[in-house]
Amino acid sequence: MPRRTATMLASALVLIALLCAGVLIKVPYSEMSPGPTVNTLGEARGEPVLRISGRKTYPASGHLNMTTVRVTGADYRMNIFEAVHGWLAHDSVVVPHDTLYPDGKTEEESTQENAEEFSQSQESAKVAALKELGIPVSTQVVVSTVVKGSPSEGKLHAGDVIKAVDGTAVKEPEDVAKLVTEHRPGENVTFTIVPAKEAAAAEKAGRAPEGGEKVTIRTVKAPPAEDGGEEGKDRAIVGIRAGTDHTFPFEIDIELADVGGPSAGLMFSLGIIDKLTPGDLTGGKFVAGTGTIDDAGTVGPIGGITMKLVGARNAGARYFLTPDDNCASAAADTPDGLTLVRVKTIEDATKSLERIKAGKTAGLPSCSTG
């Protein structure tokens, strides 16, 4: 065989081997890319994203779009070619697999966690919006979860409203743990509760749950600390986790399928405010954004900010409400034609929307300034 032909054949075989390796060899990375954006003032799959009943609402034009990020599944493993393509592409990011799915978390576990965070973000979005509008919202401490096999199993249930512990009224979830741990393991603790069904009926009627029944539970010793330390030694527990629930004066439903996580909280709050007030918050402008929100209206950071910026600009957004803690990374890679607006609270966001509506954008808080 001529030397030139042999060299070409050998090179072809090496190339084939490399191509096969690139396809077959899996690498521990996952990909993030821009997901769909949804206008909280509009519809998704033919249904309103926000549905409010029992209170006068107003038509709202413009866009207040929440943004999302697509990620590869927990069980999917990228090959070398896919990873290299993702690294080179501007509209995707390749990150270590454990960044998205830490501690071996399965896709099912991640989906469940995201669903719970999404549900909580909806609740906080409603509270923050109504507080911003000066509409009263009643808050109560509830049983969030009951540990299987604990003394509380069968006696307390998720959704039960905790009015008092040993006759002492509770106002925050932390009060419950504090009062229980004043006991020694083996002692009785008495809860005054409104059962979940009665509490749900009261919430549906737009009133705070009343009355209460007493439930006595014998405490047990807390399990050893995971790190083997002394913290929690001889601490009394009853096997519940307390949380908060709210009673709204009218019904607010947020309908959005196939979305998880807490990052849409800010945009849901703004959508609710827009629908409950005359006129338009945006003046018909296309505004997108992201950010968690708590009951007090504080905006928190999120993940995947650069992908959300790309998704927003591709959808047509001109302004992007950006959590303060995400500003540095957002400013480092902002798509052309998109103006970043720094927000720390829901009040910051509404004031900035007023400026955008009025065309006074020169004074907007920027991610490139303090």
Image (cartoon, grey):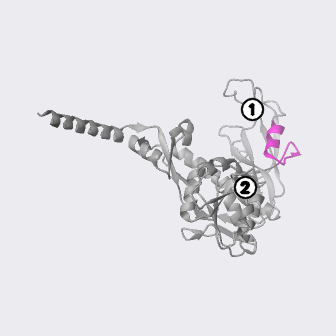
In this image, 12 relative to 105: left or right?
Answer: left
Q: Is residue 280 above or below residue 110?
A: below
Q: Where does the magenta region start and end? A: 163-180
Where residue 275 sits, quadrant-wise, is bottom right
**Judging from the image, what secondary structure is the residue with disc 2 in?**
strand
Report, in whole angstroms, how far the alpha carbon at label 2 lies from the one at label 1: 46 Å
Taking the magenta stretch, the answer to whether it contains residue 175 is yes
**Judging from the image, what secondary structure is the residue with disc 1 in?**
strand
In this image, 86 relative to 323: left or right?
Answer: left
Instruction: Give 14 or 131, whichever is nearer the viewer.
Output: 14
Taking the magenta stretch, the answer to whether it contains residue 353 is no
First in sequence: mark 2 or mark 1? 1
The quarter in which the N terminus is drawn is top left
Q: Residue at x 23, y 39 (%)?
A: 12
The x and y percentages for residue 282 are 69, 69
Amino acid on which the number 2 mark rests in the picture: Val
Amino acid on which the number 1 mark rests in the picture: Val
